[in-house]
Image (spheres, helix red, strand yellow):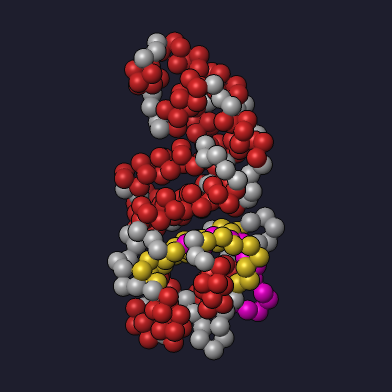
Amino acid sequence: MDIVSMENKEWEFLVRLLNKSIFFEGNYQERIRFFFEELSEYINVKAWIIGQVIMKENSPYPVFIRSLSNLPDHIQNIFIQSATDPKMPDPSNFKIAEYMSLGKHFTVQKNDLVTDKEWYRSPHVINYRQKGGVDEFIYSVYPLESGCYSTLSLHRIWKAPKFTKSEKALIHLIMQECKWLHYDIPQKTEKELLNLKPRLHETFMHILDGHSTKDIASKMNLSEYTVKDYTKELLLHFQVESRTKLISNFWTGKILKK
């Protein structure tokens, strides 16, 4: 996946979303819902499902062992069942299974898996997707150490425009780098992070936005020496040796596991 294809607006959105979500006060499920509702609004998505699946031997059908979505429970169950209906198979299932068998993270959209002709003529699509009012989709599948897969699907309304390369790269990067999406985060660690002093918290947010020491000093009406002192205190607090490592740990969720 070429994340270089991401446009500036996607990078800017992602930084804003991560800044808000990492300090979101709530449990794991509430954080996930907040994260994907913000993302859905930005890229015009009607439905999202994130969860963990396992693959049955000699079967192209995934088995959900945990899932969360913005769909009512009864509709979510129908949606999941539709993906495993042997009488009306999802035309994208077999290629998805092929990708998953490689054991690598991948992100695909509808036309990576099926042609429009195959899709719109499929009994599965006519009986499930069209009736449900969803069409264009992106799937991102991330393999976990346990042999499970963390999966995300995003769906647009019927006959909506296709996802762009930049949007696809954005989704891939989120699933690749935001490891906290795949695992519950201990509540006490969130509180420890939120207990940063106000000035340290503000400095931290400016660093995550990529601002220089000079820019941060100007924005906070402080001397550059003071900002350097705050930065050193942050590095010590998070046990990292550089601003680059601090930002990297934030992106990968390691900060929340300290």
Which part of the image, by quadrant, shows the N terminus? bottom left
Side (left or right) of 197 relative to 170: right
Residue 109 seen in render:
no
Query: x and y percent of residue 172 in the render?
Result: 46, 55
For the record, the magenta segment spans 48-60
Query: x and y percent of residue 103 in the render?
Result: 60, 62
Q: Is residue 14 above or below residue 79?
A: above
Q: Nearer the viewer, residue 167 or 67?
A: 67
Residue occupying image coordinates x 45% and y 16%: 227
Residue occupying image coordinates x 49% and y 30%: 244
Side (left or right) of 209 relative to 32: left
Residue occupying image coordinates x 40% and y 40%: 16
> Picture quarter containing residue 119?
bottom left
Q: Main secondary structure of the magenta part?
A: strand
Which part of the image, by quadrant, shows the C terminus? top right
Residue occupying image coordinates x 36% and y 82%: 120
Residue 73 falls inside the magenta stretch: no
